Amino acid sequence: MQIADLEKLRAIKNLIIDMDGVLYRGLEPLPGGREFLSYLRSEGVPFILATNNSTLTPRQYVAKLEAMDIQITEDHILTSGQATALYLAQIASPPARVYAIGEEGLISALEEQGFVLTGQDVDFVVVGMDRQLTYEKLKIASLAIRAGATFIGTNPDTTLPTEEGLLPGNGVSLVALEAATGVSPVVIGKPQPTLLRLAMEKMKATPDITAIIGDRLETDILGGKNLGLTTILVLTGISHREELYTSAYQPNLVFDDIGRFHEAWRGEYEG
């Protein structure tokens, strides 16, 4: 590690941490995650677990992590479903009519903001990860977009890391609807800035003292670099070390897993 890298570690006071591929893979915890988050809590270091995955509610994420012996509270969670609902609340006054493809995390976030969820006379089509996706859902969304509804995607991830391997992600649904309609979605999750800006707002953080830890070059690292954050890639998820030789998105720091980052950052944070 170079001296310049050590200086970047010393400057970090706030952390935005991805979950899938960083803290766990499916239901399998990854090395060092529990110890790292316990350390952050004990030291009072501000952090947000910011995920592009919109399937679960914050409460469900707390329960999922608790099952892995990782203790956090709901205010540490920010999902692309929440960010999408907050974005919609800024540009459209309820009771705007929304057709939503997605699971409980997205549906609950939209309902909490007062939107009318319907498949008729739609103002917005919002698409998140949906493991019960059907042709009928794609048909309703496609017709609504063609009729003028604004097309919004919670996140562009084409794959989802699980203990089974890489499964299709929400980006697959977005590509299908874009092909069917000729309309590109407005994307809320990483690498777009909305999710990360909301995470920083929750911590009252600024980019110069904030780092993002993620497993994807094209979302976590690109999104962080676009906002001027320190970017940290861990190699427990999607992106692999070999990709660094050809990728246009280069992280500031690379670690085998979050436990290895913890060791390096703790030394500088306490030093």
Image (tube, rainbow, N blue to C red):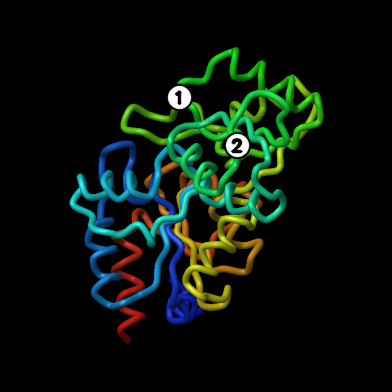
Q: Which numbered tag is attached to residue 131?
A: 1
CB of mark 1 within 8 Å of CB of mark 2?
Answer: no
- Towards the viewer: 95 or 191: 95
Q: Earlier in the sequence, mark 1 or mark 2?
A: 2
**Measured along the vertical axis of the image, is residue 241 above or below residue 76?**
above
| Residue type pointed to by label 2 | Val
Q: Residue at x 52, y 75 (%)?
A: 205
Which residue is situated farthest in the front direction here?
Answer: 95
Q: Residue at x 71, y 21 (%)?
A: 142
Q: Residue at x 73, y 25 (%)?
A: 144
- Towards the viewer: 164 or 40: 40
Q: Position of residue 161 (x, y in %)?
A: 41, 36
SS label for mark 2: strand
Circle 1 residues within 10 Å: few <14, some 14–19, many ≥20: few
Q: Residue at x 66, y 16 (%)?
A: 139
Q: Which numbered tag is attached to residue 116?
A: 2
**Measured along the vertical axis of the image, is residue 175 above or below residue 34?**
above
Instruction: Indicate left or right for 181 with 255 as reference.
Output: right
Q: Which numbered tag is attached to residue 3?
A: none
Instruction: Indicate left or right for 45 with 86 as reference.
Output: left
The image quarter containing residue 101 is top right
| Residue type pointed to by label 1 | Arg
Instruction: Indicate left or right for 4 with 184 as reference.
Output: left
